Image (cartoon, rainbow, N blue to C red):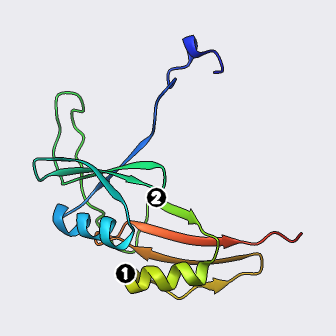
């Protein structure tokens, strides 16, 4: 796909869509706790954020449309069941944990040292899972 003429994603960017139950609660979490920047808001039911060089589109639940018939956007049904998650590689897991916790993130456990990696997990208000992970090479 090096040939721009034949690359369907030439000059494209990837956006992750997260379905949230309350756009104002999620907006507060993503901007105040995680430090995401608001790019655009759409009528109180969706919000585009720039976060760590990526796009996040937060949307409220909704039913099928002409371009996606039979497709429903729903919030996660079970808080402890995960179909996808985000991993954020950090320089210092303990320090990031303390800063995020101070900002209001609720962690499942404190950082756990697993040898070359230290990691821990937290969720957004709807249960979307985030991991912060520090990797230390053996060199």
Can you name the residue that lies furthest to the top here? Answer: 5
Decide which of 35, 79 is in the foreground and name it.
Answer: 35
What is the number of callouts on the image?
Answer: 2
In the picture provided, is 114 more to the left or to the right than 139? left
Identify residue for label 1. Answer: 103
* Quadrant location of the C terminus in the rendered image: bottom right
The residue under label 2 is 84
Residue drawn at 41 percent across, 69 percent down: 81
Residue at the image position 35 percent from the left and 73 percent from the top: 33
Q: Secondary structure at mark 1?
A: helix
Q: Between tags 1 and 2, which lies in front?
A: 1
Q: Position of residue 124 (x, y in %)?
A: 34, 70
Give above or below for 112 relative to 128.
below
Q: Is residue 70 above or below residue 96?
A: above
Name the residue furthest right: 139
Q: Where is residue 35? Give x, y as percent.
A: 38, 66
Please say if 63 is above or below 75: above
**Image check: 76 left or right of 116?**
left
Q: Residue 78 — which label?
A: none
Taking depth in this image into account, of 84 and 48 the one nearest to the observer is 48
Query: Mark 1 Cα within 10 Å, few/some/many (few <14, many 20+)?
Result: some
Q: Quadrant of residue 60?
A: bottom left
Determine whether the residue tagged by mark 2 lies in a helix, strand or loop: loop
> Picture coordinates of residue 106 (x, y %)?
38, 83
Going from N to C along the chain, the mark reached first, 1 or 2, is 2
The local crowd at label 2, few if under 14, some if 14 to 19, many if 20 or more residues have their Cα within 10 Å, is: few
Residue 86: x %, y % from top left = 49, 61
């Amino acid at each position: 796909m090096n040939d721009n003429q034949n690359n369907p994603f030439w000059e494209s960017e990837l956006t992750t869509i997260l379905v949230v139950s309350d756009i104002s609660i999620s907006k507060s979490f993503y901007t105040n706790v995680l430090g995401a920047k608001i790019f655009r808001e759409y009528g109180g039911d969706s919000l585009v954020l720039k976060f760590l060089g990526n796009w996040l589109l937060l949307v409220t639940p909704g039913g099928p449309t002409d371009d996606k018939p039979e497709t429903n956007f729903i919030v996660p049904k079970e808080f402890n069941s995960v179909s996808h998650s985000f991993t954020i590689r950090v320089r210092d897991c303990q320090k990031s944990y303390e800063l995020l916790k101070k900002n209001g993130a609720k962690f499942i456990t404190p950082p756990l040292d697993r040898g070359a990696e230290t990691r821990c997990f937290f969720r957004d208000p709807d249960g979307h899972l985030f991991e912060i992970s520090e990797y230390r090479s053996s060199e």
